[in-house]
Image: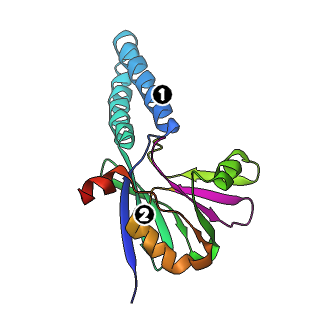
Amino acid sequence: MDRYNERLVYGKTEGKTYTRLFLVSLLMLASFFLMFTISSLFLFIAVLSVWLLFKTLDWTNLEYEYTITNGDIQIAKIASAKKRKEIMTITLADMKSLENKSSDKVKNDLTRTAQFEVLDFTEQVKTEEYYALYVKTNKNDRIVILDLDENCLEHLKLYLKSKYNVKYVKKAEDKKEEE
């Protein structure tokens, strides 16, 4: 029987989204100004830039979806609950270990960016406990930071066995559910 867990977490808006918003806003302002001074051809550019602005604004409301099936993790990015983009799939064979992000080992490895590629799929709140999944790749290994709940951790514990080095810390939402 297959085991299946799904988790939806809020994500922090990416820096490239803010850059796109700035560039599209600049294009929109320039085209409106040029439309009145030079030519009505810039009306088309103005309308196009408004459309691009609304498309880019969708990506400011970002969520990540983790789908865990028999130990394999599939990560997707969801914009404004409308657009879903598959980011990566991590197979059980590629997982090296799962650790608390607050552990000394992970803190040390996060500073060594030459050896590890760090991918953070969380809201990046400093007070929250996140988990670091070490993944082997052809080049530098990856550290994938995830926001896992108790159900996801129990699921991964079944499949990772000796690679599972997590000490579960109850989150604020879990404490509220108990009360």
Q: Name the image quarter holding the N terminus.
A: bottom left
Tell me which residue sits at (35%, 50%) in the image: 172
What residue range appears in magenta?
126-145
Pointer 1 or 2: first along the chain: 1
Mark number displayed over residue 23: 1
Viewer-proximal residue, 177 or 28? 177
Which residue is outermost to the bottom? 1
Q: Is residue 70 above or below residue 170?
A: below
Q: Residues within 10 Å of mark 2 (few under 14, many from 20)?
A: many
Label 1 vs label 2, nearer the camera:
2
- Residue 71 in view, yes or no: no
Residue 125, percent across and down?
45, 42
Viewer-proximal residue, 108 or 123? 108
Q: Residues within 10 Å of mark 1 (few under 14, many from 20)?
A: some
Disc 2 marks a residue whose amino acid type is: Tyr
Q: Quadrant of residue 50?
A: top left
Q: Name the image quarter holding the C terminus.
A: bottom left
Under tag 1, what secondary structure?
A: helix
Tell me which residue sits at (74%, 48%) in the image: 112
Q: Is residue 47 magenta?
A: no
Viewer-proximal residue, 15 or 24? 15
Residue 2, percent across and down?
40, 85
Q: CA distance from mark 1 to mark 2?
A: 31 Å
Q: Is residue 142 magenta?
A: yes
Residue 42, percent across and down?
38, 23
Disc 1 marks a residue whose amino acid type is: Leu
Mark number displayed over residue 66: 2
The image's colour scheme reads rainbow
Q: Are marks 1 and 2 in contact (CB under 8 Å)?
A: no
Tell me which residue sits at (40%, 20%) in the image: 31
